Amino acid sequence: MKTEIRGTHFTALLLLVLALGVSALAGMNFMSMWKDDLFLPAPGFEKHMLSEWHGGLKNTPADVPVFIQQGEEPGGTVFIMGGTHPTEPASATTATLFLERAKVTRGRLIVITQVNAMGFTHNSPQEAHPQHLTFTTADGSTRTFRYGSRLTNPIYEWPSPDIYIHPASGQQLPGKERGNLNRCYPGVPNGSLTEQLAFALTEMIRKEKVDLAFDLHEASPEYPVVNAIVAHERSMELAAMTAMDLEFSGIPIRLEPSPKNLRGLTHREWGDYTETMPILMETGNPVQGRFRGKTDERLAMTGVDKAYVKAAALGYLYIPYDGSQPMEYRVGRHTAAILSFLDNLELFDESKAVKVENIPSFDDIQEKGVGYFLTPAKL
C-alpha cells in the first residue's frame, strides 16, 4: 500500500515538474517578443519620442520613437506611419524601408515604423501566426522583425469593456476594439493607453503641421477594400492623381472615399481634427484572410496558398491572384504609391513639396527583394 502511495506521489511530482517546465518554456517564448526590433535610420534622421507631443505617454509602453529628417530646401511635411496593425507586415516593412534609405532634399519626412509597439509584444497563437519574419540583406546577413497581433497586448488594455463606445462619436463596437488603434482616433488624452496613443499621434500631426499623412495597411484578398487608397475628401484630388499614375504604370489600385459614418479611423479623424491630407492604403495579403491554409512565416512572406488559388478561380477575391502575393509585391505597391503621391504633392501645391531620394522603385524591389534594401545589422 505504501509503495502504491509513493508511486502515486512520484507520478504527481513528475507531472508537476513537466507542467512547470512547459509553462517556463511557454513564458520564455512569449517574453521573447518583448525585445525591441533593431532599426537603423539613414543619415539625417533625428530620433524623438511620441511623448514629446503628449506627456501622458512618457515611461509607458505606448511611447514610440518618431524619426524626423529635414531637407536643405524648405517645403512641406509628410508623415509615413507603419505598424498600426502588426499582423500586416508590409506596413511596418515599407516604413522601415523609408527610414533606412531616405535622403530628404526638400521639406520634412516623419517616420514611425511600429506605431502600436504594444501590439508587437504578443501574437495571436489561435490564428497560428508566426512570431517573427526574417529578411536577407545585400551582404547575406539577416534582419528579423516581430509579427505581432492586430490589437494592443491585453496586459496594457485590461479590463476591456463589453462594448467600446467611441468617445468622439458614440459609435458602438465590440469591447476588444478599444485595443485597435485604428478605431480610437482622434484619441483621448486621459483614456486607455491605445486611446492616448491615438491622441498623441493626432497632436503630432496637428502641431507639426503635417501636409500629407500615410497610414499603411494590408487586407485579406476577399476584402472589398484591398489594393486600395482610402482618402478623406480633403485628400481626394491628390489621391485621384496618384491612382491614375499608378494605373498607367501597371499597378492597378482602387480609390475609395472615407465613409463619414465610420468613425475612429485615420482616414476620417485625421482629416476632421487636423489640417492634414490623410491617406490609408491597403495591399492584399493572404495571411490576413479566412480562406488560407497553413499559416506560417512562409505564407506571410510569399503569399503562396493553394486555397486562394481555388478562391480566385471561383471569383471570390478582389485582387488578381496567380498563386502568390509576395512581400516584394506588397511593399513595392506601398512604396510606389508613396513616391507617386510625393511627385503629385508638388504639382498639387508647390509650397508643400517634399522630395525624397534613394528609395528603390517598384521594379527594383521585385528584382532584388526587400531585404536587399535594408541596412545590414552591425555585428
Image (cartoon, grey):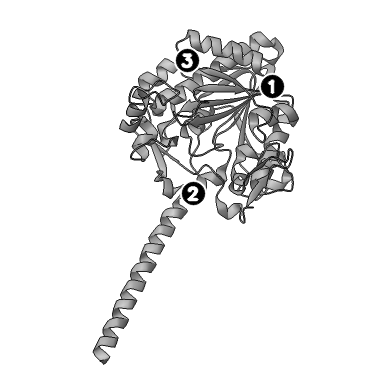
Q: x, y (%) of residue 253?
A: 50, 17
Q: Earlier in the sequence, mark 2 or mark 3?
A: 2
- The label nearer to you, 2 versus 3, is 3
Residue at the spot 40% in from the left edge and 63% down from the top edge = 23
Q: x, y (%) of residue 276?
A: 70, 24
- The residue labelled by disc 2 is 122
Identified by mark 3, the residue type is Pro
Between 267 and 208, the one lying in front of the other is 267
Proximity of marks 1 and 3: CB atoms separated by less than 8 Å: no
Q: Secondary structure at mark 3?
A: loop
Q: x, y (%) of residue 54?
A: 72, 42
Q: Which label number is shown at residue 80?
A: none
Q: x, y (%) of residue 374?
A: 44, 29
Q: Earlier in the sequence, mark 1 or mark 2?
A: 2
Identified by mark 2, the residue type is His
Q: Is residue 291 toward the left or the right of residue 192 in the image? A: left
Q: CA distance from mark 1 to mark 3?
A: 25 Å
Crowd around label 2: few <14 · some 14–19 · many ≥20 (10 Å): many
- The residue labelled by disc 1 is 211
Crowd around label 3: few <14 · some 14–19 · many ≥20 (10 Å): some
Between 311 and 81, the one lying in front of the other is 311
Q: Earlier in the sequence, mark 1 or mark 3?
A: 1
Identified by mark 1, the residue type is Asp
- The residue labelled by disc 3 is 252
Between 206 and 140, the one lying in front of the other is 206
Q: Secondary structure at mark 2?
A: loop
Residue at the spot 65% in from the left edge and 32% down from the top edge = 262
- The label nearer to you, 1 versus 2, is 2
37 w.r.t. 12: above or below: above
